[in-house]
Amino acid sequence: MLLAITRAVSSSINRCELTHISRTPIDYERVARQHHNYENALRSLGVEILRLSAEPDLPDSVFVEDTALVLDECAVITRSGVDSRKPEIITIEKALMPYRALFHIKEPGTLDGGDILCVGKNIYVGLSSRSNQHAIEQMQGYLKPFGYTVKGVSVSGCLHLKSAVTQVKDDTLLINPEWVNKNNFPDVKFIDVEPSEPFAANAVLIKDSILYSTSYTKTQMRLADAGTKMVLIDTDEIAKAEGALTCCSLIFKR
Ligand code: CIR
């Protein structure tokens, strides 16, 4: 059984961090509706939702993915690369404690979950403005005993590694090769995003289906041609906070 931790959208989302996009007003009703539809799409794929209460003082707290990496054997609580997001972990630790033994990224390590791509026992970590080599070394120490290898990957032009690449099948990555080099990922196949849709590389893989945005119609056609089963939802309001699909949940076997 898969469980997804989510968190209601903060009423202060208009004060979210932005790095690569300009600020445009976020309509609270609309973003909350898109988030609700996201949760329902996960339910339609057989995922149970554990929704945490909104955090009015933490604008980016809906993006729970950034607070932890949850593996079958344990979880790693992150330490955000921006101060405004560091307190988000307090409630996430409490929520994860019943399910996993917890490790913590410690100063001077910084890590956002959006920078972590797991492909089997290979864990790739984006060396972005949010995540650093210290965090990678700490993760190696925590996760090597469980058989994982942790490797740093350069990314440029986007916020997180998973803005540039995500898994869409057991053996296939959806990638924007402008933002991350394919050579980092041996022994996999690739589907490239349409060059006119640079933000289209973020999908949530659940069993043999992906949750995907209605915004990227051309890349959708490429995914369909490759036989990918898709559940489509609107994400354009969430995207104004520089968020994508993976960011809004922490999904793991309960
Ligand atoms: C931030 O800059 O931290 C948020 N506005 C967006 C975080 C998106 N998270 C993700 O891609 N994992």
Image: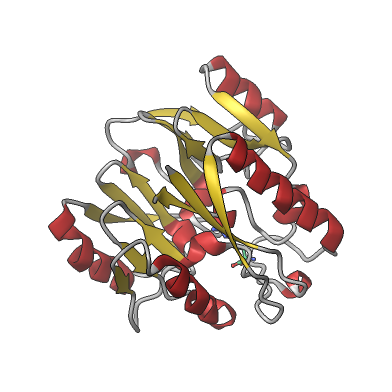
Q: Is residue 106 left or right of residue 218?
A: left
Q: Position of residue 111 (x, y in %)?
A: 41, 69
Q: Is residue 117 left or right of residue 187?
A: right
Residue 122 visible? The answer is yes
Where 110 falls versus 146 (above or below)?
below
Where 184 falls versus 216 (above or below)?
below
Which quadrant: the N terminus?
top left
Where 122 falls versus 59 (above or below)?
above
Residue at point 75% right, 49% down? 34
Residue at point 49% right, 37% down? 205
Q: Residue 103 is drawn in which quadrant?
A: bottom left
Q: Position of residue 117 (x, y in %)?
A: 39, 49
Residue at point 43% right, 76% down? 79
> Quadrant for ligand 1?
bottom right
Q: Position of residue 62 (x, y in %)?
A: 63, 64
Q: Is residue 211 left or right of residue 24?
A: left
